[in-house]
Amino acid sequence: MAQPGMVFTGGEAPNLRYAREGRGPRRLVLLHEMGGNLESWDAVVPLLADGFTTLRYDQRGAGCSEKPRAPFTYDDHVDDLERVIAASGFEAPFAICGIAVGAAIAVAYARRHPQTISALVLCSPALSVDATQQRFLAERSEAARRDGMRAIVDASLARSYPEQLRGDLATFETYRAAFLANDPVCYAHANAALAGADMEPALREIASPCLVLAGRHDLVRPPEQVRAMASRLHGAAFAVIDSGHIMAVQAPHELAAAISGHCLAHTNVAAEKTDAG
């Protein structure tokens, strides 16, 4: 049973919606993709409920979390994750799985708090962008601000949710509707944060067991690009699953199996205090 809540911090920090659920002895934080929200994980969480207690939340500017007008950075995202973990009573150690920019937040958090991480799963990780991608992000940001999410939805999803993965039309239409409901200013902020970030140097500091996943049909972060990134992460495992960029929505069973297999192999339950309720 999900336990949704809000983080009320006062001051300048935004309010954030989170959900803690599951009954398993291992703890797992789930970080959604740009343009997504905690519902991106709806098909995955039930598959993990017996083995994991999960924590997921809407990043600032997404879903039902507050929509700040000021730009933000990945340091802000890590601050937010710290507050969500504290508010939810989630205890270390725990694993983190992030998709795309969620993977970048996972790496940034692991860099700041290495002692809390039992394992990492990085899905189509968006850790840096080149000059061409920076221009694309800037143009997409401007179009969203000027004309709203409808101006960019189809071009964006053509790359992240390609036609061959839209066999379940209801799932695709639900995701498209959620994408359209994003706040254009905050979506532009999220694009700018990615354009200005470079998490790849942090990979040298990651000691936690890491699984890097690529989507076979991912046009945003193709498998060969993700494999090259994984090779720079010492001891990381790499695998390709039958998905596009948004794995939690497009391949929930494969993703849940990959998460479970990696975390079971690298988490000693006896060393953790079971806090599932």
Image (spheres, rainbow, N blue to C red):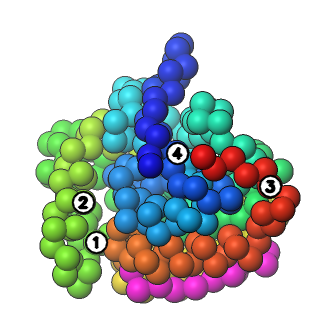
**Disc 4 designates what residue?**
20
- Name the residue located 56 percent from the left edge and 65 percent from the top edge: 50
User: Which segment did they paint magenta?
Assistant: 229-243
Q: Nearer the viewer, residue 37 or 275?
A: 275
- How packed mark 4 is, by other alpha carbons closer than 10 Å (few <14, some 14-19, many 20 or more), is many
Percent of width and height locating residue 51: 61, 66
**146 lies left or right of 64:** left
**Type of amino acid at the residue the image marks with label 4:** Arg
Residues marked 4 and 2 touching at CB (< 8 Å): no
Percent of width and height locating residue 18: 47, 40
**124 lies left or right of 260:** left
Give the numbered dot on residue 175. 2
**Disc 1 designates what residue?**
161
- N-term-proximal mark, 4 vs 3: 4
- Name the residue located 24 percent from the left edge and 51 percent from the top edge: 178
**Disc 3 designates what residue?**
272
Which numbered disc, 2 or 3, marks the residue closer to the eye? 3
CA distance separating discs 4 and 2? 22 Å
Which numbered disc, 3 or 1, marks the residue closer to the eye? 3
Q: Which secondary structure, mark 2?
A: helix
